[in-house]
Amino acid sequence: MGTWIAGITGAVVASVLVATIGFDDPTEKKDPAAEASKPAPVVVGKTAAPSNSAAAAPKKTDMSNELKIPATLPPISGPKITGITVDPKTWPKACDLLTDEEIKTAIPEGTIRERKSRMGRISNMFGNNVNDNECEITLDLPNQQSSNYPARISITSQGYKTPADEKASFAKEKTSQERTSKAYPDQYDDIPADKIAVDAAFRDNTTMQISKNGFRVWISLFAQLEDSQGNPLKNNTMARQYGPTVAAIVGQRL
């Protein structure tokens, strides 16, 4: 008798707990169709994941390692920069050479995270570091392999020489790079200067080197990308896809 009363009491307590706290009653029969339609439980302090995470992610586009030269010059939104001389004080800040709006023009599918202006890690052609001569812009692309590693555009003002001296200096460096790249043809592109509004240009792996009116600028574009099927693309894909268009914007500003 005592055992039977204890069993009844335990069942009553369990039923009360189920009703009060919301635990599932293991003795209750459930309709599978109804259970499947129930929303996922939400844990306090955490955000429930969407039912279809893949649908919420940006759609990857078809990308290739093909060099893309703009058919027409892209529009610019920033002012043209004049009055550059050998005095570093006259040099434009690197972050002033490319606005967020211009980035959206060149890379419409990109989402800008942030930009940082600083003293460049790379010395300019005179061997001096100049404040604000380097700008780093991070952005997200639909085809990046991981959100932990965003795409990056780095702009570095390398310095000024008289147009005649810069023309000779740049041509020498371009010829040297072209000769070196014969063993690694993927590392170099001869960029048609007239198509991007500069005096001379070439691509060295992930970096676009341009020269305009005696002023030299390096534009590095790097991202770990993959194609629409998830296959990894070469590290210089971003530079070949977007580099000439970004360079055309900077070139028009100089």
Image: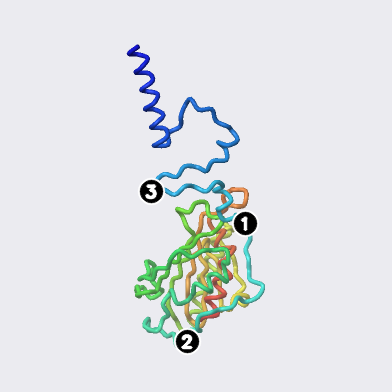
Quarter residue 252 falls in: bottom right
Using the image, tell me which numbered label, if any, was put on residue 45: 3
Vertically, is 12 above or below 148?
above
Q: How many marks?
A: 3
Q: Which residue is more in the foreground, 187 or 131?
A: 131
Q: Which residue is more in the foreground, 94 or 28?
A: 28
What is the crowding at mark 1: few (fewer than 14 residues within 10 Å), some, or many (at least 20)? some
Q: Which residue is at 55% across, 46% downward?
A: 51
Q: Which residue is mark 2?
A: 82
Expressed as whole percent of the image width and height from the top left, the position of residue 202 reads 56, 69
Q: Disc 3, disc 2: CB below 8 Å? A: no
User: Quadrant where the N terminus lies?
Assistant: top left
Q: Nearer the viewer, mark 2 or mark 1?
A: 1
Secondary structure of the residue carrying tag 2 is loop
Expressed as whole percent of the image width and height from the top left, the position of residue 102 reads 53, 73
Secondary structure of the residue carrying tag 3 is loop
Q: Nearer the viewer, mark 3 or mark 1?
A: 3
Alpha carbon separation for disc pair 3 and 1? 35 Å
Vertically, is 206 above or below 145?
below
Alpha carbon separation for disc pair 2 and 1? 39 Å
Q: Is residue 126 left or right of residue 177?
A: left
Q: Which residue is more in the foreground, 52 or 96?
A: 52
- Earlier sequence position, callout 3 versus callout 2: 3
Vertically, is 48 above or below 100?
above
Q: Which residue is more in the foreground, 199 or 15?
A: 15
Secondary structure of the residue carrying tag 1 is loop
Q: Which residue is mark 1?
A: 61
Expressed as whole percent of the image width and height from the top left, the position of residue 81 reads 48, 84
- Earlier sequence position, callout 3 versus callout 1: 3
Q: Nearer the viewer, mark 3 or mark 2?
A: 3
What is the crowding at mark 2: few (fewer than 14 residues within 10 Å), some, or many (at least 20)? few
